[in-house]
Image (tube, rainbow, N blue to C red):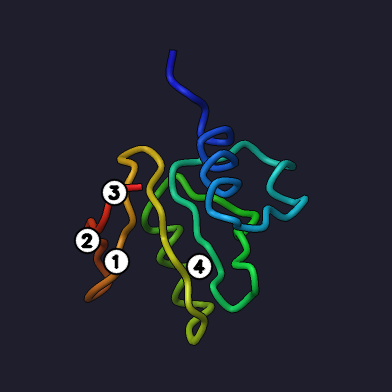
């Protein structure tokens, strides 16, 4: 049985010393997650996204901040270039 996204994200954040905000548990988790690197330790954004378009909308409206974007379905990090995601390293 596949592991739910919430559990995958929570496990990964715990292993990598990422703070999980209480708001993360208020809604079902989706495949795309963002880590805000402006905090020490880095902090998971409470919202997750099912569609890349919704994630891109969030990123463009929060320009100037540094995020690490993760795809928990494909288990990889995404790099955004020319408004398109490109796979990077595996999780």
- Residue at position x 59%, y 78% from top? 38
Which of the 4 image quadrants contains residue 88? Answer: bottom left
Spot occupied by residue 12 in the image (x, y as percentages of width and height):
51, 44
Contact between marks 2 and 1 (CB within 8 A): the answer is yes
**Circle 2 crowding by C-alpha within 10 Å: few under 14, some 14–19, many from 20:** few
The answer to whether residue 50 is above or below residue 3 is below
Q: Which mark is residue 58?
A: 4
Contact between marks 3 and 4 (CB within 8 A): the answer is no
Cα gap from disc 4 to disc 2, whole angstroms: 17 Å
Q: Nearer the viewer, mark 4 or mark 2?
A: 2
Q: Nearer the viewer, mark 3 or mark 4?
A: 3
**Circle 3 crowding by C-alpha within 10 Å: few under 14, some 14–19, many from 20:** few
Residue at the disc numbered 3: 90
Q: Is residue 85 left or right of residue 11?
A: left
Residue at the disc numbered 2: 86
Spot occupied by residue 58 in the image (x, y as percentages of width and height):
50, 67
Q: Which mark is residue 79?
A: 1
**Circle 1 crowding by C-alpha within 10 Å: few under 14, some 14–19, many from 20:** some
Cα gap from disc 2 to disc 1, whole angstroms: 5 Å
Indicate which disc, 2 or 1, sits on the residue closer to the N terminus.
Answer: 1
Label 1: which secondary element: strand
Contact between marks 3 and 1 (CB within 8 A): the answer is no
Is residue 80 or residue 83 the one in the foreground?
A: 80
Q: Nearer the viewer, mark 4 or mark 1?
A: 1
Q: Which mark is residue 2?
A: none
Cα gap from disc 4 to disc 1, whole angstroms: 15 Å
Q: Nearer the viewer, mark 3 or mark 1?
A: 3
The answer to whether residue 36 is above or below residue 71 is below
Is residue 28 or residue 10 the one in the foreground?
A: 10
- Residue at position x 26%, y 55% from top? 89
């Amino acid at each position: 049985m596949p592991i739910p996204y919430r559990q995958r994200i929570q496990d990964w954040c715990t292993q990598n010393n990422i703070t999980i905000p209480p708001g993360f548990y208020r809604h079902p988790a989706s495949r795309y997650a963002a880590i805000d690197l402006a905090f020490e330790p880095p902090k998971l954004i409470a919202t997750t996204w099912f569609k890349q378009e919704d994630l891109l909308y969030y990123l463009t409206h929060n320009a100037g901040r540094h995020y690490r974007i993760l795809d928990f379905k494909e288990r990889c990090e995404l790099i955004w270039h020319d408004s398109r995601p490109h796979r990077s390293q595996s999780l």
